Structure formats: C-alpha cells, structure tokens
Image (tube, rainbow, N blue to C red):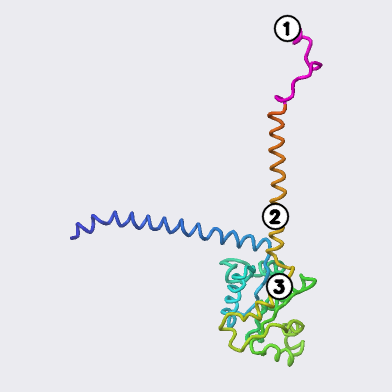
Amino acid sequence: MTAFIRSRLPIRRQVTRAASFVWKQWEQRHTAPTRLKRWIDAWWGYDVFIAHRHVDAATYAKATFEALKAKRISAFIDCEVYGTGDSLLTATPRHVRKSALLLVVGSPELLKPRTPVDWVQQEVDDYLLSHEDPKVVVVDPGGALGAAISAATPSTSSLLATLQPFLRGAPEPTDALTNPPSPAVTEAIEWQLAGRRRDQSRLWFFQVTAGVLAVLLVGVVVLAFLTLYLPSLIPPSPRLVSPLFAQRT
C-alpha cells in the first residue's frame, strides 16, 4: 500500500503544479484590467470621493461605492485604492483634488474629532481649497448631523461648521449605515455630477486622441504610397536626361 501511494506522488505533484499555473494565469488575466483601471482613475481623477469614518460608516461607504460603480460612476474609496506602504499624507490630497464631487457620510463618529489628524476634516478642507465651485453631498442618517450642526459653534467643531452650507438634499433613515444607499442619495450625486463627469472628459480626450492618431496614420500611408509608387508612374522628362546617357542611346 505504501509503495502504491509513493508511485502516485509524482502525478499528484504535477497535477498540483498544473492547477497552480492555471490559477496564476486566470488571476493575471482578471486582475490586469482592474489594475489598469485603477491606474487610469488615479491619473485622471474620480467622479466621487467618499469621505467617511471607518469605525461606523465603512459598510455604508462600501455599499455606496458599489452602487455608483453599477451606474458607471467612478468613485474613490480608500479600501479599494490604498495598499500597504501608501502614504496617506501625500496620496489623499491628490485624490481629493482630482475628484469632481465630495460625498461625506455623516455617521455618529463624525461628530467626534480626531487627533492628531482628522482625515475627514483634511479631506473636506483639501477639496474646498482646490475647487472653485465645490459640490459636496452630505449624507445625514436620521438628521443627527443636522441637529448637531445647529447646536454647535465654529469653535466647538470646525468640521461641522464647514459642512453646514452643504447639509441638504440627502436624507437617510436612522439605520441607513447598515444598508445600501437610498435612491435619493444616488440621484443627488447624479444630479450634482451633471456636466462634471470625469468619464465624459476622459472619453472626449481619448476620442480626440484616437482621431488625431487616425489622421496621422492615413497621412503616413499616403506618404509611403507616394514615395514608393509615384516615381514609377511619372515618365522622366527629356530635359533631365544627361548628354552622356543620350550619346549611349
């Protein structure tokens, strides 16, 4: 029995290696487009930047990201973009500045300031400083954020004071943080993105680039044709024949 098992070990190893090879090939083919899309989004920018507290709003933020993705709206969420070793101090302001709209999830933890760095506060400040006509959608589950903003003073919470002018148009029920975003939120995002879509600008850029490249390609083909075949189609002029060539003939 032991000899039989040993005789089958090489076959098992080959099957394992083959399965591992097939898995790696499948993973490369399916992850390459995702990596390319992430690289293009990081270079070109996003339609929506989702700012939230991880403690109590991570589920809602991820569900919002998936809902916008289903509508072909490019959105930034840190858990999908950042990896091990990425510097938030340099990457976060860059991604915020390249986003057309800022979505702030007003969870209860947002009312509690963070030290030494409040990332949501920094994201909001970076966005407002880099956009002349800012578009900010604040999700307020149960109206708790609005009540806190009405009762707060600028000295109490600078983040609440900053969000006060944008607190309208995206109501959510109290238990919204554990559910996907309501149609009212996604519709508010789409309405604010009218004429600001990064995908539209990106598509226009690539269409113009493709048109220019097509014209250049046609020009190269025409030039190559003229260079190769035009001299054989035009008979030589007698004036251009040298006297020595005329004597020989």
Q: Residue furthest right?
A: 239
Give the mark, 3 or 2, whose residue is nearer the N terminus. 3
Q: Residue furthest top?
A: 247
Q: Give the secondary structure at mark 1.
A: helix
- Report the residue marked by disc 3: 101
For this view, does 206 lie left or right of residue 70? right
Above or below: residue 221 compared with residue 170? above
- Report the residue marked by disc 1: 248
Location of residue 36 (image quadrant): bottom right
Residue range in magenta is: 231-249
Q: In which quarter of the image is the N terminus?
A: bottom left
Q: How far apart are marks 3 and 2 (CA)?
A: 24 Å
> How many neighbours does mark 2 have within 10 angstroms: few (below 14), some (14-19), or many (20 or more)?
few
What numbered label is drawn on residue 207?
Answer: 2
For this view, does 27 lie left or right of residue 76? left
Above or below: residue 79 compared with residue 151? above
Q: Give the secondary structure at mark 3.
A: strand
Q: What residue lies at 56% left-to-right and 59% top-to-bottom?
A: 33
